[in-house]
Image (tube, rainbow, N blue to C red):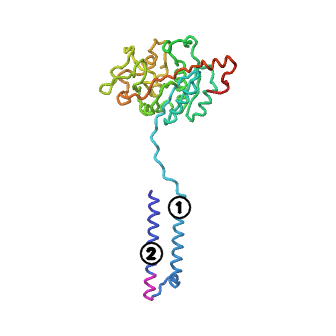
Amino acid sequence: MASRMKLKLKTVFVLYFMVSLLGLVYALMQLGQRCDCTEHDMPKDRIISRLRGELHRLQEQIRKSEATKPPPKLLPKPSVPTIFVITPTYARLVQKAELTRLSQTFLHVPQLHWIVVEDSPHKTPLVTDLLMKSGLTYTHLHMPTAKDRKLQEGDPSWLKPRGVEQRNEGLRWLREDRRAQPGGDTQQGVVYFADDDNTYSLQIFEEMRSTQRVSVWPVGLVGGMKYERPVVEGGKVVRFHTGWRPSRPFPMDMAGFAVSLKLVLANPDSCFDGEAPMGFLESSFLQGLVTMNELEPKADNCSKVLVWHTRTEKPKMKREEALQAQGLGSDPAVEV
């Protein structure tokens, strides 16, 4: 800034000097006097032409000087905490549609790292290809669910906890990766568990980004209710609005809380207990990290719903099955 100001003052001075010199020459010529400068013996038009040429040369020098001058140093932007999103996923007809929708939401969230964990003994081509094309910063993992914990065809979704091994695998990778990074154990960040079938407002990610320990908020369309939420009084969570077992330590949905990365790293044994009673999966993880009094209410003191526990309807394939029986089914090479 100071250098540019000096150049501007120099330009003004040169212009002022040239105009003054022209005025002096003109006055001397009018008086019929001679000037000591040989240039004044020249015709007036030639003098003006030479002065204009000199002015043009000086302007070019100034322009070149500004062009080669290094750009001003920008102040570094304050560090934005990274949101690490852990998403369990499993193979089904709507898997690609679910992950596509979710990935395109995440594209609008700055500084987000997506950790996708497949319920599979290996990484599948479908998820591998989708992540490569997503444009996101991601980590692709896999961890199969134990056979005795797998839901069977026709079992209700609430019968057994789902995504336990996958979420724990995401936590394991995150802890190991941060320990391997210089300064990784002090990095500002937030850990969030986002199922692939939920619906997320972009605002919820900005709400959680400032999490110090564990932040909480309402979740819509869950537990047979319009919403479940922490009840806040005086800026503190005092109880939970829920329709089932409100006596649970943390009667919340998985989509209703985020944990600071530092807290996760400081508690290396904290994980989800696959043997926890029905509805206690979230509590099994949070109990070792935080107390109710330490919860940080977000979303305008938990008065706004910014995430919904939506479910995609299972597609009906009766006509497809009928065509397959005739040998006329859809081409299996076409990925859906």
Q: What span is in magenta? A: 25-32
Residue that sits furthest to the bottom in the current view? 32
Q: Name the residue under label 1.
A: 65
| Quadrant (top left/top right/bottom left/bottom right) for the N terminus | bottom left
x and y, in percent, of residue 106 in the image = 51, 33
Q: Name the residue under label 2.
A: 19
Indicate whether 51 appears above or below 335: below
Q: Which of 88 and 314 is in front in this view?
A: 314
Q: Main secondary structure of the magenta part?
A: helix
Q: Which quadrant holds residue 214?
A: top left
Mark 2 nearby-residue class (10 Å; few <14, some 14–19, many ≥20) = few
Instruction: Please say whether residue 30 is one of the residues in the magenta stretch.
Output: yes
Residue drawn 66% across the image and 24% down it: 330
Instruction: Please say whether residue 48 is one of the residues in the magenta stretch.
Output: no
Amino acid type at mark 1? Ser
Residue 321: which numbered mark, if any? none
Residue drawn 44% across the image and 85% down it: 28
Residue drawn 37% across the image and 24% down it: 294
Q: Give the structural element (helix, strand or loop) at label 2.
A: helix
